Image: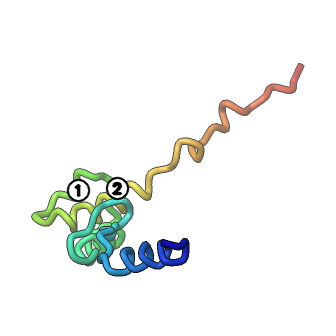
Amino acid sequence: MDRGAVLGAIWLGIMACPSSAQETFEGYDCTADCSGHEAGYDWAERNGVTEANDCDGNNQSFNEGCQAFVEEQQPLPDEEDTSDENDVDDSE
């Protein structure tokens, strides 16, 4: 079998197999679509939720969307205020 035929067979195999990649929302796996996650995120944003404990509804997708909002509001370790550590006393 020549190289072109091999590549063609591989391409055909890839195109024939449906993608099994699952859609995600802010790192959380979605079930069918991400509408539940989006609703939870939007609700948390509208209500100013700052604690993951407040994301305790009856729907896992909604809760994960809410948690994603809370997580997004947390500063990254390198974004924390380090002004006290960088202050230098030049009065000497």
Q: Is residue 72 left or right of residue 88?
A: left
Q: Which residue is mark 2?
A: 50
- For the residue pair 38 and 31, the one nearer the viewer reads as 31
Name the residue located 32 percent from the left edge and 74 percent from the top edge. Answer: 19
Q: Amino acid at mark 1?
A: Asp
Most extreme residue toward the right is 92
- Residue 37 falls in image quadrant: bottom left
Residue 84, given in percent of the width and then of the height, sits at: 66, 33
Mark 2 and mark 1: span between their CA atoms? Answer: 8 Å
Q: Is residue 37 left or right of residue 26?
A: left
- Count residues near mark 2 (Cα–Cα under 10 Å), then give few for <14, some for 14-19, many for 20+: some
Q: Is residue 49 above or below residue 33?
A: above
Residue 29, given in percent of the width and then of the height, sits at: 28, 63
> Where, quadrant-wise, is the C terminus in this rendering?
top right
Name the residue located 34 percent from the left edge and 67 percent from the top edge. Answer: 24
Q: How many marks?
A: 2
Q: Is residue 84 above or below residue 52?
A: above
Q: Is residue 62 left or right of residue 9?
A: left
Give the structural element (helix, strand or loop) at label 2: loop
- Count residues near mark 1 (Cα–Cα under 10 Å), then give few for <14, some for 14-19, many for 20+: few
Most extreme residue toward the left is 58
Most extreme residue toward the front is 1
In contact (CB < 8 Å): disc 2 and disc 1: yes
**Dot label at residue 54:** 1
Name the residue located 67 percent from the left edge and 30 percent from the top edge. Answer: 85
Give the structural element (helix, strand or loop) at label 1: helix
Residue 3, given in percent of the width and then of the height, sits at: 55, 71
Coloring basis for residues: rainbow
Name the residue located 23 percent from the left edge and 73 percent from the top edge. Answer: 36
Q: Amino acid at mark 2?
A: Thr
- Residue 49 falls in image quadrant: bottom left
Residue 76, given in percent of the width and then of the height, sits at: 52, 47
